[in-house]
Amino acid sequence: MTNRLIHESSPYLRQHADNPVDWYPWGDEALQKARREDKPIFLSIGYAACHWCHVMAHESFENPATAAILNQHFVSIKVDREERPDLDRIYMSAVQALTGSGGWPMSVFLTPDGQPFYGGTYFPPTPRYGMPAFADVLRAVAEAWRDRRADLLDSSAHLTDAIRRQMTDLPTPQVLKRATLFLAVQSLRESFDPVHGGWGDAPKFPQPMVLEFLLRYHHATGDSPSLRMVTQTLEAMARGGIYDQLGGGFHRYAVDAHWLIPHFEKMLYDNAQLARVYLHAAQVTGNPLFAAVAQETLDYVLREMSDPAGGFYATQDADSEGEEGRFFLWTFDEVRAALGQEADRFIAAYGVTREGNFEGKNILTLSASFEERRALADARRRLFTLRQRRVHPARDEKVLASWNGLMLAAFAEAARAWRREDYRQAAERTGDFLLGRLRDERGRLWHVWSEGGVRVRGQLEDYANVIAGLIELYQTTFQTRWYAAARELAETMLERFAAPVGFFDTADDDEPLIVRPRDVYDNATPSGNSMAATVLFQLAGLAVEPRYAERARRSLEAVQELMGRYPLGFGQWLVALDYALSRPREIAIVGAPDAEDTRALVERAMAGFRPHQVVAVGLAEEGVPLLSGRSPVGGVAAAYICREGTCGLPLTDPAALEMALSF
């Protein structure tokens, strides 16, 4: 017998449709039932690729006895955090306030009005790991609701007020200063792992935004230690088990400190951000391993995460055939049988042993040189072909606007960096998909597309990330429609999401929640606020619109105090601050986009890693304000370099343009 979740489009919710728990999706029906029956709400939040979500589902939600307790004493609501990042953000704040940490599956107990009063993450079926049994937690909460309700309501009111303050209170604004960037770099140096790269101990996360900031800081200052932190980390990840050595793409994180054993799920947002960091590091260093990893990651996304309609899927599971990582693991004998005479060479290069490095099997890691890696390409292809015959991990095939915006930026930039026509086509297909399938007749975004339908109104992160992708797509194709769409979405973002400083995460006409969320911390993805600041600075240059830059500047001023102290939580903010303080260039190249003289200028302007500029190309009447009032010189395409509203004399010689951009 199925429950209501059978009618949901989220694969994660449908995974629980056969549970004996009387699940509801989030909505009025569940909330009204809780009020009508005077029951507390049990809110469970997770996502399809979450290993421990599957564990708790099997141990507790499929258990008839546990389900009976839930059905008798609670109204149970299941939420896909990827569909509802606003709910996840609010109730994760509650769990972190209550326990000092957070994670998924998230388990929160609410009043019928949605105010949290108790919560945690994974609860086992029997007491272990220092945690109580889930059934015991349920009985204790039900008893407290019956016998000590006044205390619970009082604590929930205080907790809700604390969440509201957390999401509205910001430090005193500070004038933007380069010292903040220096302090952030110093803090990152102090916490850097000098042996394995990255930051922190186990579990270890890739931190793509921090790596991007350090690359930009090195570019602006020549600081060698910043570049060393980036290259050491990228090299270690590219060689470790966190990277799929056969199929490309990165797993979510490593459970150890040296990148060997991953949590095997793959997330679209990780691969979008890491592909760009590896691309940029390849441009800066010329390291062929970095270029190969970036392209293999994008090729993996094209091959395994593409929807025929044009978007990219959200995640792949860690598990297959009921075992974590099974799809990716190899025994010594399997490798030897598959590769024959080449087996010894491959075994030596990829650390394969009879004992294995993970539960008796091998996670492939690279210890050989890049030249040896290249020489073993055929062996890798043979193992990959064999692996493709295995049962694949499940895939969450919903398409999220925010994550697709990140991936759009990656494909667009890679297309121009490597002149890859397939990447350009993928980027344009994604742009068309986002603007066609995930934008309504009023020009507003949806958050989720799944099985041909849309759901959940677009949130701040959707607007900011899609704008970021469209800006990159414009600078790859120089088709005005991509710029125009980015600016239209920016105006909607300013109108519907504006807070006194920065932005709220939800629109002013969205469903009212216990608080209107506003997150300023960068997590696995950029916060909507930090990405909004980033793209507003870029659009200010293209649109010649000072109010965009002013809005972004005020956002930065409000969180600047936090950036230097907590750089790991403010990576994208540091990217935006670095851009703001760099006196970015706005380059207008006026000429027919397809003409040879125009292309020669564009090639010089876009060559290599140039993070502190925006480029517009075309004729003055084509609709990008940066081009307005400027013209070719003597019938020859001309480049105008502008900074802070002041433009230099036009340049028609590509070599002269390259020289001017070198300072």
Image (tube, rainbow, N blue to C red):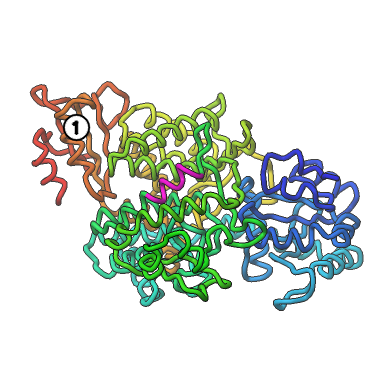
Give whichever of 216, 158 is nearer the camera.
Answer: 216
Q: Is residue 62 visible?
A: yes
Give whichever of 258, 437 is nearer the camera.
Answer: 258
Residue shown at the point (38%, 33%) measured from the top left: 425
Residue shown at the point (21%, 45%) measured from the top left: 607
Q: Could you tell me the amino acid type at mark 1? A: Arg
Q: Is residue 573 visible?
A: no
Which quarter shows the N terminus?
Answer: top right
Q: Which residue is mark 1?
A: 599
Residue shown at the point (57%, 52%) measured from the top left: 390
Indicate the quadrant where residue 367 lies.
bottom left
Q: Main secondary structure of the magenta part?
A: helix
Residue 563: x and y in percent read 42, 63
Indicate the quadrant where residue 559 lies.
bottom left
Q: How many marks?
A: 1
Indicate the quadrant where residue 128 lies.
bottom right
Residue 429: x and y in percent read 44, 32
Residue 648: x and y in percent read 14, 39
Residue 461: x and y in percent read 51, 45
Q: Is disc 1 placed on a helix, strand or loop?
A: helix
What span is in magenta?
296-304
Give whichever of 211, 385 is nearer the camera.
Answer: 385
Going by the image, does 415 lie left or right of 43? left
Is 278 situated above or below 421?
Answer: below
Going by the image, does 238 lie left or right of 91? left
Give whichever of 210, 13 is nearer the camera.
Answer: 13
Residue shown at the point (79%, 57%) measured from the top left: 42
Going by the image, does 114 lie left or right of 185? right
Q: Is residue 22 magenta?
A: no
Label 1 Cα crowd, 10 Å radius (few <14 / some 14-19 / many 20+):
some
